[in-house]
Image: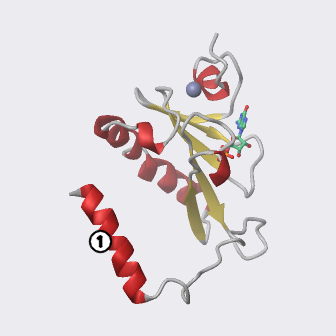
Amino acid sequence: MTSCIFCQIIERAVPSAKIYEDEHVYAFMDIMPTTEGHVLLIPKKHIENIYDFSEEDAANFFKAAPKIANALKAEFRPAGLNLLQNNGAPAGQSVFHYHMHFIPRYDETDGFQLSTWETKHTTYTPEKIQELADKIRSVLA
Ligand code: 5GP
Ligand code: ZN
């Protein structure tokens, strides 16, 4: 049996509160929700992180995202919605099967904070930002 907890959830070897599935994706409630309605969307294929997606896998995964978002909007009427996904342990990934968090937001006391999102606009001048853009563009070309 696979050691991946999310593969086990897809195989029904581990229970979950499923909200949606199709041929390519499975969506279920996070067992440790940060706000009301916190959902995880995962590909059925074991894909570890964003780097491992083919274009086809990505299309199949992301086409389900608005469906989940709109269901949460209809049910909870949140003031906002954060989509979050972590790649690699230093980025906060703890389950190494790709997943996207859907975190409905209600108000500033709803318990979810991106409190470490510190900006460094004095280090990253417009010239430096342009230099970084040029480097990234050269890899994409
Ligand atoms: P990460 O830190 O990798 O971005 O998020 C992993 C998420 O998976 C966490 O929010 C955690 O609560 C959730 N999680 C881990 N194990 C299980 C499980 O067995 N069932 C469910 N429903 N969620 C899980
Ligand atoms: Zn897996």
x then y, percent, for residue 97: 57, 33
Residue 7 versus residue 37 in the image, above or below:
above
Q: Is residue 28 left or right of residue 61?
A: right
x then y, percent, for residue 7: 59, 23
How many numbered discs sit on the rendered protein? 1
Quadrant showing the C terminus: bottom left
Q: Which quarter of the rendered image does ligand 2 occupy?
A: top right
Quadrant showing the N terminus: top right
- Residue 110 picture quarter: bottom right
Task: From the viewer's side, name the closer residue of 49 and 70.
Answer: 49
Q: Is residue 7 left or right of residue 46?
A: right
Task: From the viewer's side, name the closer residue of 68 and 115.
Answer: 115
- Which residue occupies 67% across, 19% down? 3
- Which residue occupies 62% across, 66% down? 78
- Residue 73 picture quarter: bottom right
Task: From the viewer's side, name the closer residue of 66 and 3.
Answer: 3
Q: Is residue 118 left or right of residue 141?
A: right
* Residue hosting label 1: 134
- Residue 77 picture quarter: bottom right
- Which residue occupies 73% across, 65% down? 112
x then y, percent, for residue 120: 58, 82
Q: Amino acid at mark 1?
A: Asp
- Which residue occupies 64% across, 20% down? 8
Residue 96 versus residue 100 in the image, above or below:
above
* Residue 101 shows in this picture: yes
Residue 104 versus residue 128 in the image, above or below:
above
